[in-house]
Image (spheres, grey):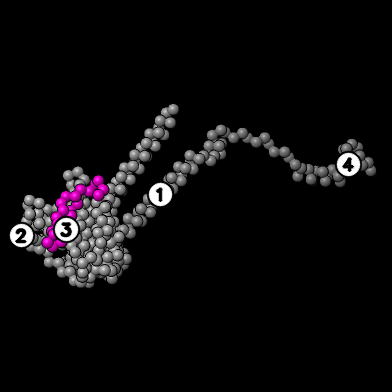
């Protein structure tokens, strides 16, 4: 009788462990958006940026940020809790090169309960729409997703991990902080 | 001659036969003495007989040992990679070391001898936790083999490999900055538009 109870307890513990692991994995996967379906747009784009940074590459990038340079030190401080950064930018020569379905392929992933649409702005004049989604884990931001569309440009940003949003907003230097001196040549942007 | 002796040992024996009997009698079969009973304690065969539990335990032990060995080797190889990465990120530091250390060999980079981020140089490094940076002449005794390990590491990580890692690191850094810049730019657009139309 006792052995039966022990076996049952072990089985329950195993089930709980599996469930917890599955949930954790599912959550981690949810934060990262699947952007592979957008790769087809690269052929039509005149200019594109595809950044996929996670794991060892992200760690390598962190190491190479120079703590003596204030801008890089700020980034280094900001991204300490970062697990992955995924960005896709497609710039087209003419309008209508990407469809609503392309945007919806990303948007549908953000309808998961873990994500919350924080803000969305639409500009009828410029035709530019920007939506910001966040995944909150407790009081911290566990992930950010930005979808920005205008007639000739489609941008998706997916940041996985904890990040200070305020510092990120200030990064591009529009609020008194000098902007980063980033030289983006065409070769790199194509990459 | 009476041959009864040959048949049933009756009658008078022949001296020649008698002599043969004496000679060969020494080689007669003698039944062995009664075998001594073994004490119960020495009956190990039953004690060490095959037991499934014992076999499982032995297998688990072997697996654990193999796993430990594999992990150890993995950690060692990954630490070598880490050293390569860190060493390439510290090219200016290495140059400084060449001036300060009188060792004719190339400058020492961070090494791993149980402590993954131990720096064997005399200067603080950006990529190595400063609290863990140990001057070469103050290496604890347990790290006495550091020089040999570092020398071996240099053989393992030739200059072209370090250059490649440096290139990859610089590229990853540029990509990271670019990605964050794009994200920041889009968030700024949102903020700007919200500020421009506070009622919306």
Left or right, B154 with respect to A67, comes to right
The magenta-colored residue range is A111-133
Q: Quadrant of residue A46?
A: bottom left
Magenta: main secondary structure: strand
Disc count in the image?
4
Q: Categorize mark 1 by other alpha carbons within 10 Å: few (<14), some (14-19), many (20+).
A: few
Q: Nearer the viewer, residue B56 or A34?
A: A34
In the picture of the structure, the residue carrying the numbered disc 1 is B65
In the picture of the structure, the residue carrying the numbered disc 3 is A129
> Pointers 3 and 2 in contact (CB under 8 A)?
no
Measured in 3D between alpha carbons, the distance from the residue under mark 4 to the one under mark 1, in whole angstroms, is 76 Å
Closer to viewer: mark 1 or mark 2: 2
Subunit that carries the residue with mark 2:
A
Q: Nearer the viewer, residue B69 or A40?
A: A40
In the picture of the structure, the residue carrying the numbered disc 2 is A176
Q: Categorize mark 2 by other alpha carbons within 10 Å: few (<14), some (14-19), many (20+).
A: few
Closer to viewer: mark 2 or mark 4: 2
The answer to which of marks 4 and 1 sits earlier in the sequence is 4
Q: Same subunit under labels 3 and 1? A: no
In the picture of the structure, the residue carrying the numbered disc 4 is B6
Measured in 3D between alpha carbons, the distance from the residue under mark 3 to the one under mark 4, in whole angstroms, is 130 Å
* Residue B88 pos. (x, y %): 23, 65
* Residue B173 pos. (x, y %): 20, 63
């Amino acid at each position: 009788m006792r052995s039966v109870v022990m076996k049952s307890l072990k089985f329950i513990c195993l089930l709980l462990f599996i469930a917890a692991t599955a949930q954790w994995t599912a959550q981690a996967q949810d934060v990262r958006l699947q952007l592979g379906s957008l790769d087809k747009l690269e052929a039509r784009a005149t200019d594109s940026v595809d950044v996929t940074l996670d794991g060892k590459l992200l760690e390598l990038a962190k190491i190479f940020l120079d703590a003596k340079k204030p801008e890089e030190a700020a980034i280094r401080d900001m991204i300490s809790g970062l697990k992955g950064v995924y960005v896709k930018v497609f710039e087209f020569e003419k309008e209508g090169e990407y469809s609503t379905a392309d945007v919806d392929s990303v948007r549908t992933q953000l309808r998961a309960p873990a994500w919350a649409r924080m803000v969305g702005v639409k500009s009828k004049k410029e035709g530019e729409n920007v939506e910001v989604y966040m995944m909150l884990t407790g009081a911290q931001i566990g992930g950010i997703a930005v979808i920005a569309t205008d007639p000739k440009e489609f941008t998706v940003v997916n940041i996985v991990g904890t990040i200070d949003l305020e510092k990120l907003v200030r990064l591009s230097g529009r609020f008194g902080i000098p902007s980063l001196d980033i030289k983006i040549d065409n070769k790199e942007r194509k990459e | 001659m009476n041959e009864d002796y040959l048949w049933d040992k009756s009658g008078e024996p022949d001296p020649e036969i008698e002599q043969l009997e004496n000679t060969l009698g020494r080689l007669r079969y003698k039944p062995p003495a009664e075998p001594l009973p073994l004490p119960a304690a020495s009956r190990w065969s039953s004690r060490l007989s095959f037991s499934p539990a014992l076999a499982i335990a032995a297998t688990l032990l072997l697996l654990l040992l193999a796993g430990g060995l594999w992990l150890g080797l993995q950690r060692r190889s990954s630490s070598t990679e880490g050293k390569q990465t860190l060493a390439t990120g510290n090219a200016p530091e290495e140059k400084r070391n060449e001036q300060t250390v009188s060792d004719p060999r190339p400058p020492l980079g961070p090494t791993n001898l149980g402590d993954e981020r131990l720096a064997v140089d005399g200067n603080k490094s950006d990529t190595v936790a400063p609290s863990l940076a140990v001057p070469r002449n103050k290496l604890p005794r347990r790290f006495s083999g550091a020089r040999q390990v570092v020398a071996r590491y240099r053989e393992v990580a030739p200059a072209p490999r370090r250059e490649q890692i440096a290139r990859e690191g610089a590229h990853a850094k540029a990509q990271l900055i670019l990605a964050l810049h794009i994200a920041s730019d889009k968030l700024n657009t949102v903020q700007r538009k919200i500020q421009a139309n506070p009622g919306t």
